Amino acid sequence: MCTRVFNNSSNDFLTTARNMDWQTPLATSLLCFNKGLSKVGCAKVTSKTLKWESQYSSVITMIGEGNDRAASEGINSEGLVANALFDTSASYLSSYASFDKQLDVTRWVQYVLDTCKYVSEVVDKFADDSEIKIQLINKKMPGSENDALLHLAVSDIYGDSAVIEVKNGIFNVYQSDNFKVMTNQPDYETQILLNMATRWQWSEDNPTPSQTIPGGPFSADRFQRAAFYLNHLTEADSMQESIAQSRSIIANVSVPLGFNFSSQNVSTPETQWSSVSDHNNQTYYFYNNRTQDVCYCVLADINFVDDVLQLDLIENNDGEVQQNVVAGLINHKFKLGSDPYQAPVEMLDNKFIA
């Protein structure tokens, strides 16, 4: 369920690609947020709720409708990209750790992109010695009965990368420009070992490679396949080349629509849509696999006539899924939207901390 790859062979042409894998189509919208917006970390606000003001503008892919939305991924005006992927082993509650503030896990991506410029800043916010101890709160995936069990990948304009996982409420942070690929399972420590094995198997150190590249749809297969192709790319000499490279790799690890295979009574999700984020130009590309359309937003050129702009790509109309045909540059197609994470009016005079 989902794959993320970071193409950072050249800092001049940085791109991050992602597949969104799910059993069924989910209501999906692109939302552009201006900087300077007051936000809260939980739908039910208490004294423990994390509050912040957005320091950067962003374009976010939101899952769900109305105020029940999950920030799946996005890019901000400083070229920081955040991708939330399913993590079956994530657990947010802890009986032995203390926390200052709480944040719904479905708002994790938004908080990071609103308040951080670099990967190192994200890492600092979730480090053991962070100034504010944050507890992630579990939520259901919008339009689903599944818990939003997530881990987070971030990548920035300097080619840095980090993966953050949560076990028993504790953040496990892995930071390195070599951590380019992330899937759902096993835990990232094991994924690192898989990557090391893949690198060795097909390196000059091994004159007789015998292992074939895994071709299956499962997480470990997708990780090794993406890592293999990413580790053997020639350095991109243009942004167009980097985008094409990332798009072709993420397509190679997608799960075909209509794929019908069950293992232990668990169905395999299909790749509903894909994306590529251009860090250097703050441009976001969205590929809808059911319409074959590619649309893109240039964040630097967004005219924030309103602080929140929205474009619906996949809608749920009385139980019927509507795939909207949207192609090309979409900056001019956004309409007035509402912020699902907006702070209540009565909180606006309070001091915001982030």
Image: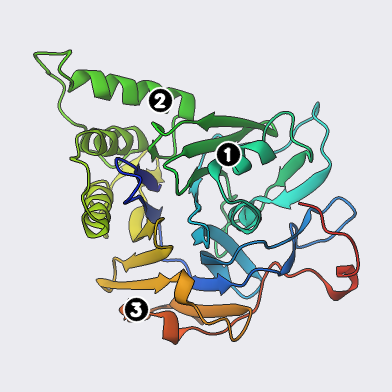
Position in image of residue 117 (x %, y %): 58, 51
Q: Amino acid at mark 2?
A: Ile
Mark 3 vs 1, N-terminal side: 1
Q: Quadrant of residue 344?
A: bottom right
Q: Which mark is residue 329?
A: 3
Position in image of residue 297 (x %, y %): 41, 72
Q: CA distance from mark 2 to mark 1?
A: 20 Å
Mark 2 vs 1, N-terminal side: 1
Relative height, residue 164 to residue 290 (above, below): above
Under circle 1, the secondary element is helix
Residue lying at 25% horizontally and 33% vertically, measured from the top left: 231
**Image check: 126 left or right of 224?**
right
According to the picture, the residue beneath numbered tag 2 turns out to be 192
Q: CA distance from mark 3 to mark 2?
A: 37 Å
Relative height, residue 22 to residue 175 (above, below): below
Comparing 161 with 206, the one in front is 161
**Image check: 168 left or right of 230?**
right
Is the Cβ of the residue at disc 2 closer than 8 Å to that at disc 1? no
Q: Amino acid at mark 3?
A: Leu
Within-10-Å neighbours for mark 1: few <14, some 14–19, many 20+: some
Mark 3 or mark 2, which is nearer to you?
3
Within-10-Å neighbours for mark 3: few <14, some 14–19, many 20+: few
According to the picture, the residue beneath numbered tag 1 turns out to be 120
